[in-house]
Image (cartoon, rainbow, N blue to C red):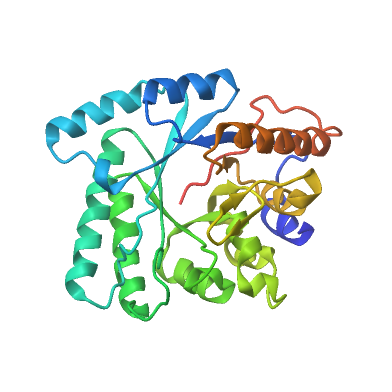
Amino acid sequence: MESIAENIFAGRNSSKRFQPKLVLCNFIPEIDKLGEFARLHGFSGIDYSFEMENLPRTPALEAEWVKETASLQPLEVRYHCPFERVDLGHDDPEKAGEAEVLFRRIIRLISKAGGRYVTIHIGLGHDSTEPLSWETTIEKLRRLVNYGRTMRVTVCLENLAWGWTSKPNLFEKLIRRSGAGVTLDIGHAHACESVQSRQYTVEDFVSPHADKVCNAHIYHTEIPDIGHVIPDKREDIEDRLSLLRDIGCNWWVIEIRQGEQLLQARKIVDEYLKLSCASEDPAPDGTYPERKL
């Protein structure tokens, strides 16, 4: 991991203290209560996951949603589209086209709200990659990334626990050929077969494009039919947090949707940060610059 840090940040002032923004999901439906919870517990932002059934369908509803989201200020908000079986690269052209229209619409909505990042997936909810076209996926993802740039929204691709994005060599090709940013899910990276079999390491999801990692999802691992599992102790995730620290990714979403477990995971992350920063001098602003793609 030191090699990544040395290659990317050789010129960085080592006296700066790394302090990421700790972020929670919108696990509370009411935006006012969500903001209250975040401020009460010292979170710096919201990672807002859209739900297909609750997307605003008219200009009036979009304006209302933008106004509600603005009430979260000064918390920063980034966005997430965990839509199952909605794929830019579906081998059915009609379904691929519908997905592209949907994601473009969401990017416009995010832009209206002043958002600057959105995370999407490839193959989420499918049992195999058979319904997907590799070349169509890359072509349409590249187009979506370019469209996002016109809206000042960075489109990021998340690694999943299975499928193309669970294999670091294929994930690298998708990122390189599309120009997308990266959302590194450290739980998916831990759970995927390519890491469990020791064919790859978690670092392999990062090393080819460490400068493109804009967001991180933090929890220990994902278990089928159970979901996201929090770490029992700091050592469970320490190496992966150090990897994020080394590359300067400063948006850490503690991706747990149960309040008590979320706060338990937060304590472990706080413990890691306290120990890792104990010997560092504070920086004037306390953070590293954000990724600009």
Identify whether 63 is placed above or below 103: above
Would residue 131 appear left or right of 6 to someone viewing this image?
A: left
Would residue 280 appear left or right of 228 to someone viewing this image?
A: right
Question: In this rendering, does residue 206 appear at all?
Answer: no
x, y (%) of residue 245? 70, 46
| Residue at the right extreme of this rendering | 279
x, y (%) of residue 110? 31, 40
Would residue 230 appear left or right of 69 to someone viewing this image?
A: right
| Residue at the front extreme of this rendering | 225
Give 182 or 129, whichever is nearer the viewer: 129
x, y (%) of residue 69? 34, 28
Give 70 or 82, whichever is nearer the viewer: 82
Question: In this rendering, does residue 237 appear at all?
Answer: yes
Q: Residue at x 60, y 41 (%)?
A: 250
Q: Quadrant of the N terminus?
A: bottom right
Identify whether 242 is placed above or below 25: below
Q: How many marks?
A: 0
Would residue 244 appear left or right of 46 to someone viewing this image?
A: right
x, y (%) of residue 23? 55, 35
Q: Residue at x 30, y 76 (%)?
A: 136
Identify whether 117 is placed above or below 40: below
